[in-house]
Image (cartoon, helix red, strand yellow):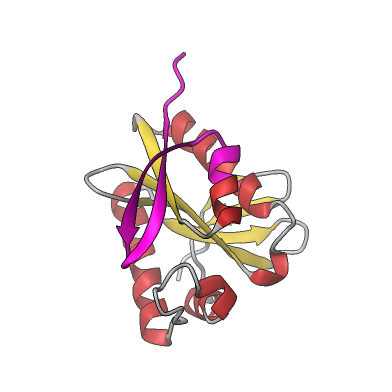
Amino acid sequence: MSAPVIILETERLRLSTWTETAVDEVLALHSDPDVSRFLDIKGRAYDRVKAEARVAEWRRDFAERGLGKQRLTRKADGAFIGRAGFSIFVGDEPEIGYTIARPHWGQGYASEIAAALLDWLFTTRSEPGAVGFAHVDNAASRRILEKIGMRPTHEGMIADMPHQFYRKDRPSR
């Protein structure tokens, strides 16, 4: 496997492509029921097969489109924090997403990376905007989307669960 590509950095965080530890990291991240509870209607954790499939999908998205969920680490010590980035939602619309490992909750990492991701998108790419969504009961994630300037648009179903959708358009110059 080649060396990871650094996609962006913030004051405390580094977002880079996945390394050889990707599947184990994603498996550990998504084996925590508190992390998975808003991602699966039954709160099921990932198994190795699902972790492998997700990592392969994110790598493919990045190789083909320059977008994808990526590996999030803390710059100070290289600790794995979670994953963040953009997937392609319906059509060609980038969908912002982030999942932070429970030991790192409450430290502002999700807000920091989400704001940086929107800045990165609007600085380096031409998409007219981005969407985001969070389970209607995931107040923390909804607050983050609102904090980074996304506006609620509608409720809809994702994975048979109710989600609040958000949008942010490219700022006018």
Q: Residue 80 location in percent, x, y? A: 64, 68
Give above or below for 33 relative to 87. Answer: below
Q: Is residue 103 magenta?
A: no
Residue visible at 55% across and 39% down in the picture: 146
Q: What residue is drawn where x is 46% and y is 22%?
A: 171
Q: List x then y, in percent, for residue 91.
A: 21, 45
In reply to whether residue 146 is colored magenta, the answer given is yes
Q: Is residue 2 left or right of residue 82?
A: left
Give left or right: position of 58 versus 24.
left
Residue 55's place in the image compared with 62, above or below, is below
Q: Residue furthest top?
A: 173
User: Which one is in front, 81 or 9?
Assistant: 81
Q: Provide the residue span drawn in magenta.
A: 144-173
Tell me if residue 54 comes above or below residue 63 in the rendering.
below
For the image, the number of numbered tags is: 0
Q: Where, by quadrant of the figure, is residue 49 drawn?
A: bottom left
On-image quarter of the N terminus: bottom left
**Residue 108 visible in the displayed image:** yes
Across and down, in percent, residue 108 comes to: 71, 51
- Give the image quarter of residue 163: bottom left
* Residue located 74% across and 56% down the image: 107
Q: Is residue 84 visible?
A: no
Q: Is 163 left or right of 78, judged from the image as shown? A: left
For image coordinates 42% across by 26% down, the residue present is 170
Nearest the viewer among 71 and 152 is 152
| Percent position of residue 60, x then y | 31, 61
- In this view, the residue in front, 76 or 162, is 162
As drawn, the residue found furthest toward the left would be 91
